[in-house]
Image (tube, coloured by chain):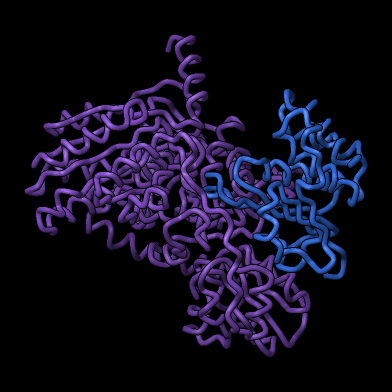
Chain colours: A purple, B blue
Amino acid sequence: MLFLSGDEAVATAAFDAGVKLGTGYPGTPSTEILECFESLGGQAQWSPNEKVALEVGIGVAYAGARAIVTMKHVGLNVAADPLFTVAYTGVSGALVIVSADDPGMASSQNEQDNRRYAVAAAVPMLEPSDSQEAYDFTLRAIEISERWRVPVLLRITTRVCHSKTVVRRDGDALPQPRAAEFVRDVRSRVMIPAFARPAHHNLREKLRQMAAWNTSDGPNQIVEGSASLGIITSGISYQHVREAVPQASVLKLGLTYPLPLELMRNFASRVERCLVIEEGDPYMVEAALAAGIAVEGKPDMFRFGELNVARVRSIVAGDTTPEPKPVAGKPPALCPGCAHRSVFASLKNLDCIVAGDIGCYSLGVLPPFDAMDSVVCMGASIGVGLGLRHALPPEQAKRVVSVIGDSTFVHSGITGLVEMIYNPPPTGHVLLILDNGTTAMTGMQEHAGTGRTLDHAKTGKVVFEDLARLLGVPNVHVIDPTVDTPKFEKLVKECLDKTELSVIVARRNCLLAARYIREYERCNEQQGN
Amino acid sequence: MSSKVTNIVIAGLGGQGVLTCSDIVADVAFHTALDVKKSELHGMSQRGGSVSSDVRYGAQVFSPMVPPGEADFLVATAADQVPVNAAVLREGGTIIDPSHIDESKLRNKKSLNVALLGVLSRHLQFSEQEWLAAIRRILPEPLHEANVQAFHIGRGA
């Protein structure tokens, strides 16, 4: 028996199943999966972003091997393009895509419910409710992927990812993976319209079969209880339901797309009142109602944030009295001595309009800096900054700066930089890359700009200033903002005053990461690689 | 629930070892063959902000989160985090905060979290040996001595 977080359980199952390669991009609450997989002895790598990670995973699965691709919920937006079409092509090996959703936004910019992606992309979806199921369902996902030759989404949520529960490991649950081998299959994998049209029909037929299988043999569970109250639920909500309403009959769904509608219909018909209790969007309840199943959903106020035992009790009781506001804790802040502090103090002094981005430096929005005016999604700082420059009157446009971190720049800032070269605003633009040598926010992961792989070995390195110069940015500067902050501020001011394009790389290792970075560099130097 | 579940909430600020604390408590319970769940949030909260972690153990535990008003113990590594988390405590629940410890006696000030576990340990059914074994399993070897000392200070306080 083991005591594992949901993330560790997914990694352990992937390792036990002989997954050939794990790919992903760090993002809370998914980050630990690949790190744990690697520490167990699996082969794992960080990709520049989730789209590339999924594409690499698709290649692995086309080769007949088993692949796992991990990301946070918003990462699936980035990977959506390959997702929708790999559903058509199918796979030869196994392809498991982990979407770690963050209801309640513990560490995210939105609380999108990625069960909608399963429906939209027509990809089957499993939802574990604890670490044991995170382990079991990862194995089931591989099984389903190989049986129907489809990609499978494994949707875990913050509380499943980061809660530890008891896990029994069953390494022999699956047959050994097949040896990777290229088998040509042009009609399945080349999605020109002539081949894509039959592929869509084929996919819908697979889903019809899966829905029937889900009703008869799917990973669902019925807890017999009272005939007066039945609850249909899935994922972490199941745990809250069992505790809040121990007397209720419960239908817990494991495979939530395609839904086992006939199983749900049968269950609902056997109880007087049938409630659907689900975190986030009213996904299952809408599907059930559309199928003519007599169920009721939760009041709209419970669509926001996480569910918990108290909220489930309120849903069952139909209690919609406003909930007490939680006492405000101490908000997070940039570490004392963090280089970002010097940057935001300067931007505030210069009264900049700051198009910001995702990372520790998003905290520049808070006092005492108050130096960030937008944060949308990974990489958006550059496009948004350019758009502001295009539209604002010149006196305001000249104050606009885009601020992006090193890992975020690798993730999706490079195309923004290309846009900046291609469509420069009349007032020019200033892009600040805050390079602290690590993906700090998610816990110090490597990326293509550090020149080290997921396990910190030396590899190819993307040098931001070289890239900017090569693309034709006329003013490229590299500066440590902490050594002489007035000098840094003066440099930003000079760049703002030009009607040209400027890239300033503000380079200073993250305080928390610095000693690890020194150690990795020392090891890599000793090994002479 | 019919069978009694023990609910412990550990709260503090990022960097104070709140999650290490909950790892140790959960590990003690896990190694005595109880069902146990531990919940926490990572991410933004690590940047010096409020952090809390729930540990629940008993014959069978469902939700990993302690419901409001049901915590038997609130262990706070910072006194100002007690009011922030007070709503989680049941009526008659126990607060354990830094005032229980004479910090000048700690060999390493960073071991306050484990000293507070020493205080908590007096209220729970696990033996001293079980606690010390968990501390040794969870913490890296160089930290064992200072933390075992801290645990004893709390347990004897």
Residue A47 lies left or right of residue A133; in this view the side is left
Instruction: Name the image quarter holding residue A273.
Output: bottom right
Instruction: Name the image quarter holding residue A120.
Output: bottom left
Residue A196 lies left or right of residue A254; in this view the side is left
Q: Please tell me which residue lies in front, A491 or A374.
A: A491
Position of residue B78 relative to residue A259, above or below, is above
Q: Residue furthest bottom?
A: A272
Q: Residue B147 placed where, x, y %?
A: 78, 32
Q: Residue A23 placed where, x, y %?
A: 45, 39
Instruction: Name the image quarter holding residue A261.
Output: bottom right
Quarter occupied by the N terminus of chain A: top right
Residue A490 lies left or right of residue B120; in this view the side is left
Q: Is residue A183 visible?
A: no
Q: Residue B130 placed where, x, y %?
A: 88, 39
Position of residue A299 relative to residue A67, above or below, is below
Q: Please tell me which residue lies in front, A203 or B111.
A: B111
- The residue that appears at 82% across and 62% down in the rendered structure is B93
